[in-house]
Image (cartoon, grey):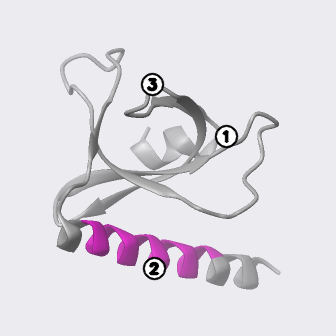
Amino acid sequence: MTKQEQFDEEMTVDITLENDEVVTCAIITILEVEGKDYIVLLPLDEDGNNEDGEVWFYGYSENPDDPNEEPVLEYIEDDDEYEAVADAFDEYLDNCEFDELVEE
């Protein structure tokens, strides 16, 4: 099973912010950009909704020797790296919209 197939089902993850606030996020997809994996998260409010459409990007890695170990998420500090991930996500969204048009 590929990483994308694992996340095609609706899954969530809890993220602890710097102020110790815990935010539940829906996992949208995992993208590969320049050989590195990134996860795209949709932060949800207490009712499980996202009113503003904001998404969060994090570096993503798994331990290949232990698939049961929790994945590691890394904050993206580099502006160019963040921009590359944002561009890849825009392309992902464009492909999703194209796929929906083709299916109709």
Name which residue lies at 41% across and 43% down: 3
Amino acid at dot 1: Glu
Q: CA distance from mark 1 to mark 3?
A: 25 Å
Q: Percent position (x, y) of residue 13?
A: 53, 31
Mark 1 vs mark 3: in front: 3
Mark closest to the chain's N terminus, 1 or 2: 1
Amino acid at dot 2: Glu
Neighbour tally class for label 3: few under 14, some 14-19, many 20 plus, Cα within 10 Å: few
Q: Which residue is mark 3?
A: 20
The numbered disc on residue 91 is: 2
Examine the rendered structure and indicate whether residue 61 appears above or below residue 70.
below
Residue extent of the magenta highlight: 82-96
Does residue 18 appear to the left or right of 98 in the view shown?
left
Examine the rendered structure and indicate whether residue 102 appears above or below residue 16.
below
Mark closest to the chain's N terminus, 2 or 3: 3
Does residue 54 appear to the left or right of 48 in the view shown?
left
Residue 47: image quadrant is top right
Amino acid at dot 3: Asp
Mark closest to the chain's N terminus, 1 or 3: 1
Q: Percent position (x, y) of residue 71?
A: 33, 28
Name which residue lies at 32% across and 20% down: 67
